[in-house]
Image (spheres, rainbow, N blue to C red):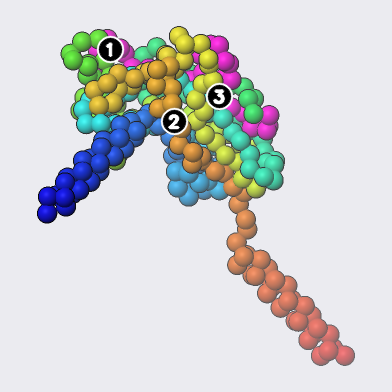
Amino acid sequence: MTIKSSATKNLAIGLSALAVAATTASATLTMDLRASGVTGTGVLTNSKNVTMEAAGGTITFQVWAQVTGAAGMTGIQSVSGSIMSSSLAPAASATGAMSTSTATSPFNNGNVAGVTAELTADTVGDVGSTSTSLLTNYIKYRKDPNGGGEQIGGAGTFYSTGTAPGGATINTIAGGFEFLMGTATLTLSAFNATALNMNWVKPVVTSVANRGTMAVWVDGGVAKNGNTNFAEYLVNSTAVTITAAVPEPSAFGMVLVGALGLVGFRRMGFRRIA
């Protein structure tokens, strides 16, 4: 009996340790790009799928920062990155341009709208940068570090948190909260692509100072930054996918039935005359 009790106790301790490790490992900042609206000839199926006619249209994107971690203060102060396009095979045939990004309050304090440019060589514009040294041209969402929201231990930087949003638009998610950081639009002037992906891309800067300021957040009451916690700054791998619209099969059927009926009518009329 003693042996069984010890084994059970050891198993419980082991499972507890694994649970703690899993909780610690899940502490992350994850950026999530979503489609929130379409004008023109497009159709918004859901936040990750848009159908677009050849004539194109304008898609509005929302940028969300999801912060998860151990129990305690969880929130975001600032984050930098880009919004880029990448085509799926076969290669996209599309022409379009991204707008600069509009930061959503309270992340519009010292924010940077980003610079529009062709960063992925696919004829669809992007916004941000591929610089390895400076964050200057990247999109940056930043909350006032001197007020509003919550501080660690009541001193230092102010964060927008789940318990003190400071005016931010937030949602509760598994293990934490998500914060609406900003918006941007993509206007497609032509679109005949099989599929085109749009997603948030984290900066590729390598200097310690700049990498440290690419993201500042807090989870479980612990301050994090892009340099010390670079591996915890993630991007949702599910991109927004834009696909070309396919005419409804029923439309082809209607045309075919009409054409066959017309042919039959003409044949009948010819025989009667004869």
From mark 2 to mark 3, how far is it between C-alphas?
Answer: 19 Å
Principal SS element in the magenta part?
Answer: loop
Instruction: Indicate whether 103 appears above or below 55.
Output: above
Of the two numbered discs 3 and 1 in the rendering, the one whose residue sits closer to the viewer: 1
Neighbours of disc 3 within 10 Å: few (<14), some (14-19), many (20+): many
Amino acid beneath label 1: Thr
Q: Residue 182: percent from the left, percent from the top?
A: 41, 27
Label 1 sits on residue: 157
Check disc 2 and give the amino acid type. Answer: Leu
Q: Please, what secondary structure does the residue beneath circle 2 have?
A: strand
Question: How far across and down, in percent of the image, does residue 96 sit?
Answer: 63, 33
Residue that label 2 marks: 234
Cα gap from disc 2 to disc 1, whole angstroms: 22 Å
Q: Tag 3, which secondary structure?
A: strand
Residue 192: which quarter of the image? top right
Q: Nearer the viewer, residue 218 or 228?
A: 228
The percent coordinates of residue 159 (x first, y second) are 28, 19
The verdict on residue 136 being magenta is yes
Residue drawn at point x = 50 percent, y = 46 percent: 49
Say which label, 2 or 3, has the lower sequence index. Answer: 3
Magenta highlight range: 121-148
Q: Residue furthest left?
A: 1
Q: Which mark is residue 16?
A: none
Q: Nearer the viewer, mark 2 or mark 3?
A: 2
Image spot of residue 24 (x, y percent): 30, 32
Q: Please state which of residues 194 and 167 is positioned toward the viewer in this rendering.
A: 194
**Whether residue 70 is visible:** yes
Amino acid residing under circle 3: Val
Instruction: Please give the residue where the numbered disc 3 appears in the rendered image.
Output: 127
User: Magenta includes 16?
Assistant: no
Asked whether residue 65 appears in the rendered view, the answer is: no
Relative to 52, is 77 on the left or the right? left
